[in-house]
Amino acid sequence: MTLLLIVIATAYLGFIFGAAWYFEKRLSNVGFRRWMPYIYALALAVYCTAWTFYGSIGRAAESGFDFLLIYIGPTLVMFLWYPIARKLYYLKVNQGIGSLADLLSSRYGKDAAIGKLVAALSLIGVLPYISLQIKAISESFTTLSGSASPINTGFSLSDPALYVSLIMFAFTIFFGTRYVQNNRPKAGLIGTIAFESLFKLLAFLIVGLIGLNSFLRDDRFYSALDRFSHQSFELPTADWASILLISGLSFMLLPRQFQMGVVENTSEKNIPKALWLVPLYMLILNLLVLPFALMGPELAPGTKADFYLLSLSLQSGGPATAALAFLGGLSAATSMIIVSTLALGNMFSTHVLVPQIVWDKDKPLDRRIIGLRRWAIFGILILAYFYYHYIAVKESLVSIGMVSFVAISQFAPAFFGALFWKQAHRKAAFAGIATGFAIWFYFLVLPEILNLVSGDPQLLGWASPQLIANSMGVSVLSAATIFSLLVNTSIFIAWSLNLEATQEEENQATLFVKASSLLSGNEAPEIYRGSAPFPDIKSLLNNFLGNERTEKVLDRYARLNNIDWSVSPTADSRVISYAERLLSEAIGPASAKIMISSVVQREELSRSEVLGILEESQKVLRLNRELSTRSEELRKATEDLRQANYKLQELTELKDEFLYTVTHELRTPLTAIRTQAELVHDDPEMPEEDRQRFIGNMVQDCERLTRLISNVLDLEKFESGSQKLSLNRLDLGQLIEDTVMQFQALAAKKGHSLRCEISAPLTATYADEDRIAQVLHNLIGNALKYARHDNGAVWVTAYRLDQDLKVNIHDNGNGIPISDRELVFDKFYQVRNQTRRKPSGSGLGLAISKNIIQMHKGKIWIEDNPGGGAKISFTLPLYLQEAQMKNSKPHIDA
């Protein structure tokens, strides 16, 4: 099993390198853009780490359903995610934001101290979380292979987690640190993380279903389920509320979540899909947790609860299923390691390491900046690996993760204040974060250090975090959450209300709070005045971005803004602001501000001037939106006119074709009448028998002309609304029988059978008898015309259906195609289909029938006829009084 695990792990890690290379080449193509919302949503699922894959089962086995709280928190956050993510996207694009440290530093006056604080505390808070993933990889390997745990044997070169960590370092620097700009989207990275999210979901589902199928055949499953249903898992309100709160906040603020949700987001259009896909993902991933938690103690009593999935998958599905479970856990862990180390490495190098070298601005620094990031990532991985070996010995996967969640939640007051509260102050944010982390350290980290050093976590006596939590009746985790966030938020609000902000901070506050309205254009409004020689600006960008990148971005900016650098030797405030944003993407907002100030003669604006500029910017944005709206309205109007013109042309063509058909129908009998009349006129000696035959034919042709002209006139009256009905009490059954009797001679002549089937007398109704007779004549005549040539059959059925009388005319002909069933009632139907068959009439019969039935407030349509042939049905409402019909509304959807 050991060799198998090594082979498949190596193959999988090699595969994700290939996948990253593929996504790097393909995701930037236009054809892949429609998939980006789904890729973005899957990338956000990096939240589900080895903690989810293994630890949820362990927590469920120990505490019941409270493991779901870790996923309910993010699900609730998704209800609020759209406005937050949209604002963050605008800030990322227009302010050069590449991390949470960049965001808070930029918002609070581009303050370097806040950036350093957030970077350092993020590293301290998340480092145990990264070690958790390394621990999961190592222990999952030893659980399946049966080898000794590296934690118990000390540092060992045979530890698979060591090599996985080194491979993850190689992957991260190759696909995550190729560009000097932090917030430049990395297609290979986001594509691979999305793939790993999908893979771990499918792996968990397959392994879970195989395991469930095995458990359901084991009687112990039902006894375990019965015990679980009677077991009491009491969780104090403060505990579950704390877990909900910190899990929701961590979903937004964890470095890996900020990296995937903000930095790697390529469009605000990606956000809506994630609002329902991410909760759905978490729901599916947790569906099969409980069966493994129930059967773990029964089938694998000697296994750690965190790794029940591996042991039970080996028992239920064999080595192949266990290997799939191992790969699922590996993908969950590696995706978190990659994104977290990248985000922390960028943050730490930008705000702690890079400021030490930016003063040497006369030398190219782009490669050195990338080098510092890579060393930072390497250092973070090494620290996490040694933390896993020497500190995270006894902690469960979930407990380590929850400690990190409380730490990251300390950024929440400053984060929300930055986005939504203009009065939020940088000193208040700094003090609140620092105090909150100090309380977190005291409650959750210090006892572990004391335990590691002296073996006694209660050395603090009455001030011990455990005793404080016991006195409150909550867990230590809840006590840490309550105290740290309460004190943090109180300090943040109180200090902000009593401190006066600098002009820079006020300007940034306005931009951040109104980001959705001010930054939705291509550029942010310029809120300071300044100028500098363009060569100095270009030289500064060359040093930090490299010559090639600088030439590309400046050329693009010049084309978009119609600037010729050769005739514009001085960079105005727009160009300077753009350059500062580019530098912020590479070295952070605080360092970028310092670098720009070294070459720019900058003048701060007063509050009234800033408000004036912002008001003007809002007017421009409103005008742009109005122009876009008018353009869209004009486009729609143009499209409507085009459609109307197309319909007019079509109607003109149909009118011409209809007139051609009608004149053809008129010309045919007229020609026959004239020919036969000339024969009679020119031959006085014609035998009387022939003379009478010709005269009879002329009479028939005259009747045909009369019917055609009557049909055209009737149709015109129906469509103009001038046709009136003569309502009388009608026995529909008798009318049907009389009409069928009239057609018996024609049916016999054609060799067809014609019958009437009315099983019960029909209730009398009010209708125009002549018009209904006209409908019956049209429909029965058509049925006889299109019935089979040999053994043709037509039959008419009628019966009462609720408050209607329904009549059906059947024939055994070829039937009417589904595509034509609505068109046959169009007066132009036969005209349109002359190329398919020569019409035997003007094509007005069914159109007139439709109008007659609709005037009676009935419906007419083509029904399916399982026996073959056509079946035309119509209904007449059952009116017991004439007034009922006059007051009802007609059907117009035949």
Image: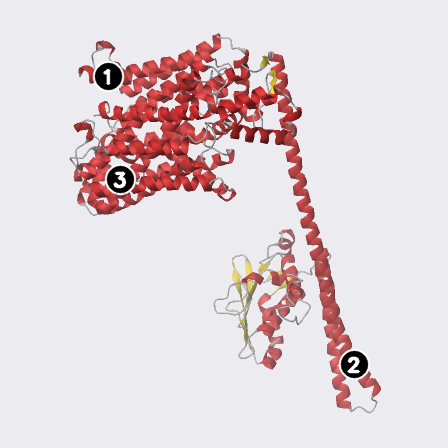
Position of residue 234 in the picture relative to residue 487 (left or right): left
The residues bearing labels 3 and 1 have C-alpha atoms spaced at a distance of 32 Å
The three-letter amino acid code for the residue at tag 1 is Ile
Disc 3 marks which residue? 326
Q: Which residue is mark 2?
A: 675
Task: Locate residue 458: give its quadrant.
Answer: top left
> Where residue 322 sits in the image (x, y, percent)?
24, 43
Q: Please tell me the numbered disc located at residue 449.
A: 1
Q: Earlier in the sequence, mark 3 or mark 1?
A: 3
Q: Secondary structure at mark 2?
A: helix
Residue 811 lies, in percent from the top left, at 54, 71
Q: Residue at x 24, y 13 (%)?
A: 464
Q: Given this view, does label 2 or label 1 mark the residue nearer the observer?
A: 1
Image x and y of residue 223, in percent? 18, 40
Say whether disc 2 or disc 3 marks the residue closer to the N-terminus.
Answer: 3
Marked residue nearer the N-terminal end (2 or 1): 1
The number of numbered badges drawn on the structure is 3
Judged by depth in the image, the label closer to the viewer, 2 or 3, is 3
Q: Tell me the tag on residue 807.
A: none
Q: Quadrant of residue 792?
A: bottom right
> What's the residue type where badge 3 is placed?
Phe
